[in-house]
Amino acid sequence: MSTLSRQSFAGHTKKIARRVKGRKRPRRRKHAVMRIGYARVSTEDQKLDLQTQVLNKSECDIIFTDHGYSGGSFERPGLEQALSRLERGDTLVVWRLDRLGRSLVKLVQVMDEFRQRGVHFHSLTENIDTSSSGGKLMFHMIAALSEFERTLISERTRAGMAAARNNGQRLGRPPSLTDDELAAIVKAINERGESLRDAAIRNNVSLRSLRRMIARARDFGTASLQANCGPDLCPM
């Protein structure tokens, strides 16, 4: 390349550099604020229709759901997708506070994470909107009252179960074998030498369940059952 050509090339390069330097950089496109809905039901038999209809009416841009997930755990695929989609300025919308979760401690932790990320939360039923200071106060009050109510229900349930046991009522599902059926099994084992395994197969119960029922009869069964269910019958 001749000296003149090199000078022309250098001058052309300087002109391009000056034009690029004077040009304004394109502005970063702002994030479009979104309302992200979340719905949850605890069992497979329940339906999400009511929640999704309300969320759609509240103008949610997208709705994530969890079908058959308990509110006690926050490890839910739909909730994780909703939380990962949230950006600064967005709002997570739920039909009712307990749809997000039932643990007061975890709810407060989630709200604190939202605050740090600049994300808002809106519960439609309780009219909680954390974009305002009043909404933040309302959230903590309702969450505490909900936790208190669940504690009272749990205490009443335990008290009712204890009273039922004291009155001789059996709780839970019915036993696989009646006392008469269990007495016949014990008689077959003691008198005919039938094995526990064969007795379990004949009565369509597991060997473990049969051992457990015999051990229970030994302690809490009728007098005749207790007499026949000696320690040699079913060593534990």
Image (spheres, rainbow, N blue to C red):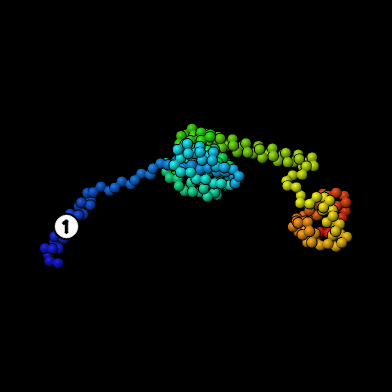
Q: Quadrant of residue 119?
A: top left
Amino acid under label 1?
A: His
Residue 92 locus on image (x, y percent): 48, 41
**In terms of depth relative to the viewer, which is nearer, 145 or 163?**
163
Which residue lies at the image location 80% right of the left edge and 50% below the top edge?
Answer: 178
Which residue lies at the image location 48% right of the left edge and 42% below the top edge?
Answer: 37
Q: Residues within 10 Å of mark 1 (few under 14, many from 20)?
A: few
Report the quarter where the N terminus lies: bottom left
Which residue lies at the image location 50% right of the left edge and 45% below the top edge?
Answer: 64
Outermost left residue: 4
Q: Which structural element holds mark 1?
A: helix
Residue 210 locus on image (x, y percent): 78, 56
Residue 100 visible in the displayed image: no
Residue 41 locus on image (x, y percent): 57, 43
Outermost bottom residue: 1
Which residue lies at the image location 31% right of the left edge and 46% below the top edge?
Answer: 27
